[in-house]
Image: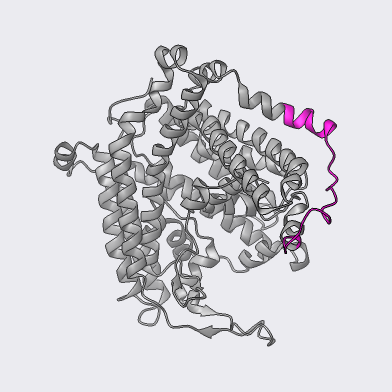
Amino acid sequence: MASNHSSYYDGCKIFSWVSDYIGLSVDQVNFVISQFVALALASLFRTVLHPSKTNSGTRHGFGLIFGLFIGYFCFGMQAIHLAGLPALCYIVIRTQSPEIMQRMVLAIALVYLSCIHLHRQVYDYGSYTLDITGPLMVITQKVTSLTFNIHDGLARLDTELSKNRKLYAVSKMPSPLEYFSYALAFPALMAGPVLFYNDYMDFIDGKHLLQKPPNKNLDNSNSRTVVLEPSPCIVVFKKVALSVMFAAMFVKFIPMFTIQTVKEDDFIENTTLAFKFYYLATSTLFVRFKYYFAWIFADAICNNAGIGFSGFNEDGSSNWDAFSNIHILKFEFSTSLRDSIEAWNIGTNRWLRIIVYERVTKHATVLTYALSAVWHGFYPGYYLTFAGGALFTFAARTMRRRFRHYFMYSYESKFIYDVLTFVLTRLAMAYVTFTFVLLEFWPSIRVYLHMYLCLHILALLALTLVPRLTSKTVPDISHSITNGRVAHALKHASPLTNSVSNHHD
């Protein structure tokens, strides 16, 4: 059973009166307070401690000190793990050969994180109380990505590296201050986003304001130009307002569509298959609002510090989405599982790609899902979600290759295809992700059985029968497309091919 108390929580209790007044648990109150404090502190990074006004050591120290302060405020003595995990990994980094240390650090970080996951699972099973595992998951991503980047920079030739690995390769060992500042700096401590080491150092040194000249006709491969730094204030205000809106909707609607309802006999026995899909889709939608709040607010904190500026749009407006963790519209209105996964938890996707997908030659998708599952923890629901996700990813890929080109003859038929795939994607996402929220194994299996394992069976049929009954050959479209639609049809007619740019498809 899920725990309904917060005795496991070891954070500051000074704002318990706020918790009692507004009806939220003290851990949730502390999280919100810590994020607003981080938002205010972030502006000092961009103004008082701007790279043009202070040295990098001061900026490193500022981020590190307040990161530790916020960690202790939110987690109490559990905050020792915030320093413990990266400290163990740093010892390995400085004492072992770059040829092997990346795998050792990955093993140590995952074992350390897994112990904390299991401790939480034993002593506070099923609880959503804020605990140290959230920041530790982000720290694990940082220290492991750094070690693989060091491995690429010191133990590999450029010719052996992909474009991404070249971009993030680190050729100089970080000092203790640089390392712990990177791991624990307050802007991205509580909810990310995950920054790779080079990106963080560019922010500290002010190099994120150096951009290559836009003239592609000139040979300026090694030259850079300083751009006028735009103010992020309007963007920060919009993101904070949006995140608060999602938080309010989560608090308002989640009690009406609690995931625990799916375990009740009345829901299992006395509702139709259509209603079950409706309820799963609605309840998981409102659960996502919690993630939208945390990720968008964290993105606003980073923007307020000066992190995330990626240049200017064609209309001259500034773009502050370089490290955004979620593209909401792309996720909610995607027409494929691939697009949905691309838009969700983007920093984690980037991390998985750089340390797994681009480094293995066989079973890349399966191994990527496996690492993601272990990183999340050991609740059975996680593994049901990731196993289902892998199955549906392969099935969707097969169906797309075999059938998509038949709908590319006109805009009308493509619109029909997009509507169908949008609906199927929404149903599949609800079907496969509710177990991630429910956490429990047998209640999840019971729901699946009373839904007749319908999507699992369809996915298996797609993988086994469809390739035997259909052809991969793209039919001739030259006589079917008229009125300027040939170019559009040709652009979309070929089946989807594998690409290393995304580890899930």
**Left or right: where 300 falls relative to 463:** left
The answer to whether residue 11 of the structure is visible from this angle is no
122, above or below 392, in the image: above
Displayed quadrant of residue 283: top left
Residue located 46% across and 29% down the image: 278
Report the residue at 34% width, 54% height from top: 242
- Asked whether the viewer can see residue 416, the reply is yes
Residue 151 image point, x, y percent: 66, 59
Q: Count the numbered circles shown.
A: 0
Asked whether residue 178 is drawn in magenta, I would say: no
> In the picture, which quadrant includes the N terminus?
top left
- Of 166 and 450, which appears nearest the observer? 450
Q: Could you say where residue 33 lies in the image, as x and y percent from the top left?
A: 25, 51
Tell me: residue 92, above or below residue 275. below
Q: Which residue lies furthest to the front in this view?
A: 483
Q: Is residue 52 above or below residue 154?
A: below
Is 414 in front, or is 439? 414
Q: Give the range drawn in magenta.
A: 461-486
